[in-house]
Amino acid sequence: MSLVRLNIKGISYSQTQNGAYALILSEEDGERKLPIVIGAFEAQSIAIALENEIRPPRPLTHDLFKTFADRFGIVVKQVIIHKLVDGVFYSSIIAERGADEEILDARTSDAIALALRFNAPIFTYKDILNQAGIHLQTTPVNHDDSEQQDGAIAKLLDQDTEELEQKRHNYAKHTLKELKELLSQAITQEDYETAARLRDELSKRNK
């Protein structure tokens, strides 16, 4: 399968849904954009990496990983968004240490935050871009185009937030025992985002 290089165009914030962000990636030799919904922490980390003049008083998690990797001679060579399942993007980090190369599974938001810190290229496969890529004007030529672009991103963010709220509503129907079983399953399957939401629901019940 052919790889397509992606560049980061920016981060969009939903004006209607609190805490919803979309990372906008664009194909290097084309007009399609790949919007990926990310969390607030990841959005902040990526934004800080994009703005070289911003220096947090203490290192963020991704900054710590970069320092750790530098200390032990580990280099992130590239990031590949390799799979899309039920609206969730899966990524791999290609890292090297000397002559050894490792492929590490990672959340796409974390992988991109690290790619920025290592100046590593970001790729995806053509079939993923064909499936999830959308056409957005890079520079809107008029007000109507600007509203259309904002509307397309807002729709994506609203849909994702609506699904999240639906999951939270469904969790409220479960007993404590069921929630703990679901949490165990999520951790076993390495679905840490679901695990975090389940922990939130358990914490609410324990207050």
Image: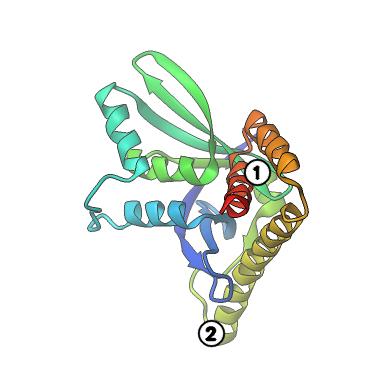
- Front-lying residue, 18 or 204: 204
In 3D space, how far apart are the residues under numbered discs 2 and 1 (Cα atoms)?
Answer: 30 Å
The percent coordinates of residue 206 (x first, y second) are 59, 50
Q: Tell me, for residue 139, which label it has, or none.
A: none
- Front-lying residue, 191 or 68: 191
Q: Amino acid at mark 2?
A: Asn
The residue at which mark 2 appears reads as 142
The percent coordinates of residue 47 (x first, y second) are 38, 57
The vertical placement of 72 against 145, above or below, is above
Can residue 167 be seen by looking at this rendering? yes
**Image point (27%, 33%), residue name:** 67
Q: Quadrant of the C terminus?
A: bottom right
- Front-lying residue, 192 or 115: 192
* Residue 72 location, quadrant: top left
Residue that protrudes farthest toward the front in the picture? 207
**Image point (63%, 38%), residue name:** 191
The residue at which mark 1 appears reads as 126
* Residue 195 location, quadrant: top right
Image colouring: rainbow
The vertical placement of 28 against 1, above or below, is below
**Image point (45%, 51%), residue name:** 42
- Front-lying residue, 151 or 138: 151
Q: Residues within 10 Å of mark 1 (few under 14, many from 20)?
A: some
The vertical placement of 116 against 166, above or below, is above
Is 202 on the left-hand or right-hand side of 97?
right
Look at the numbered disc 2 and give the secondary structure of its residue. Answer: loop
Look at the numbered disc 1 and give the secondary structure of its residue. Answer: helix
Residue that protrudes farthest toward the top in the picture? 99
The percent coordinates of residue 23 (x first, y second) are 51, 57
Q: Amino acid at mark 1?
A: Lys
Can residue 119 be seen by looking at this rendering? no
Give the mark nearer the N terminus: 2 vs 1: 1
